[in-house]
Image (tube, rainbow, N blue to C red):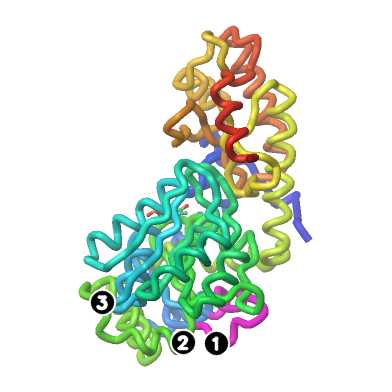
Amino acid sequence: MTDRAKIMPPAQGEPWLLTPGPLTTSLAVKQAMLRDWGSWDSDFRAMTAELRSRLLSMLGAGGADYDCVPVQGSGTYVVEAMLGSLVPRDGKTLVLANGAYGQRTRRTLDCLGRAHLLLDKGDYLPPRGAEVAAILAGDPDITHVAVVHCETSSGILNPIGEIAEAVEAAGRRLLIDSMSAFGALPVEPAHVRFDALVSSANKCIEGVPGFGFVLARRDVLDGARGNSQSLSLDLHDQWAHMETTGQWRFTPPTHTVAAFLQALRAHEAEGGVAGRGARYARNRDVLVAGMRQLGFETLLDDRWLSPIIVTFFCPDDPAFAFDRFYDLMKAKGFIIYPGKLTVVDSFRIGCIGQMDEGVMTQVIAAAGDALRDMGVTDARPPAAALIERARLAA
Ligand SMILES: *Cc1c(COP(=O)(O)O)cnc(C)c1O
């Protein structure tokens, strides 16, 4: 069960981060970093082992065939490690893109010199199982499909269940960027068949930045020797070294690992993936209902809204300016996030981190005050925004 009493405001003068990572962490997570560890020492090796086994157990049903490989760096480094190590050099990847992170996957494959095909759905339309099936049927050279679980640039929750079914039916392999979803949304191998997924320390598990991790089938890791043309991002090598020595190949982010272990224990105490996901869903529900009451509208229909981050259209009222809104929200203690849509102006508010619905209620009050401070009387978006949204519903 969620222990709501444990949510504490950040330290004096520190704002709430309504951003999709780095995000607001607990005091206990921050305090876990107040000592030093020797990376070769058995204490730290035990911490690495606990981290790997705790992450594996979060896979739930069907996770026994998987292993966990942490990798130094931000999430993008680990996506690159996954693509460069698990896709053979003569492989071809179908990239499903509906936002910045899907585009980054394509760019990464470009840099790696790996063949790929892009299904580009624009700013936010979801890639669907049937269109993936049709593309795979028409191109026997495709070996892998890469999908983003929650595309953080719009907040859309992509339908990975139907996509995984299409990929499996076609006998291809699925790689998931679950960076902003893992830990809050279930990805159980018993229900969603995939070769590997990636996430990082500073998203739904509520640690601090410094490393990411891959959860991959053990046979796939075993078969990945020699695929990577990078030394530091070679997943097979990192895995093999960790298996034999219990250590990271190169200097590990020791303090980040210590903080992450504290975050993992809190995650378990909250009820694991289900408990974490339930708190984030309540955060989203309170946020969306309150913002709609103020007149704001969401980019996405309820059906596609994730409990991770929500995109709102900027009001049409000429008195509204995002930069001013941002500053006013910051002065009230909340850091929000600019939007990433190309067609209409928008901004985003995250639902993840050490926050609960009480905090979200304060966010709504602050947004209402900010509108009044700016002299905005009507928070409704321009007609063009609603036309955009109608396209999605169609
Ligand atoms: C955060 C995120 C990443 C990684 O971003 P970094 O800035 O490298 O940590 C990748 N994919 C998605 C969907 C994300 O939300």
Residue 34, compared with residue 302, is above or below; it is below
| Residue that lies at the very extreme toward the bottom in this rendered image | 244
Residue 89 got which mark?
3
Q: Amino acid at mark 3?
A: Arg
Give x and y (percent) for residue 260: 51, 64
Which numbered disc, 3 or 1, marks the residue closer to the eye?
3
Q: Which residues are magenta?
A: 53-66
According to the picture, the residue beneath numbered tag 2 turns out to be 218
Residue 65 got which mark?
1
CB at mark 3 closer than 8 A to ligand 1? no
Q: Amino acid at mark 2?
A: Arg
Q: Between disc 2 and disc 1, whose residue precedes?
A: 1
Residue 38, compared with residue 343, is above or below; it is below
Which numbered disc, 3 or 2, marks the residue closer to the eye?
3
Residue 159, compared with residue 322, is above or below; it is below
Q: Residue at x 64, y 40 (%)?
A: 393
- Pointer 2: residues within 10 angstroms few (<14), some, or many (20+)? some
In terms of image quarters, where does ligand 1 lie?
bottom left
SS at badge 3: loop
Residue 311 got which mark?
none
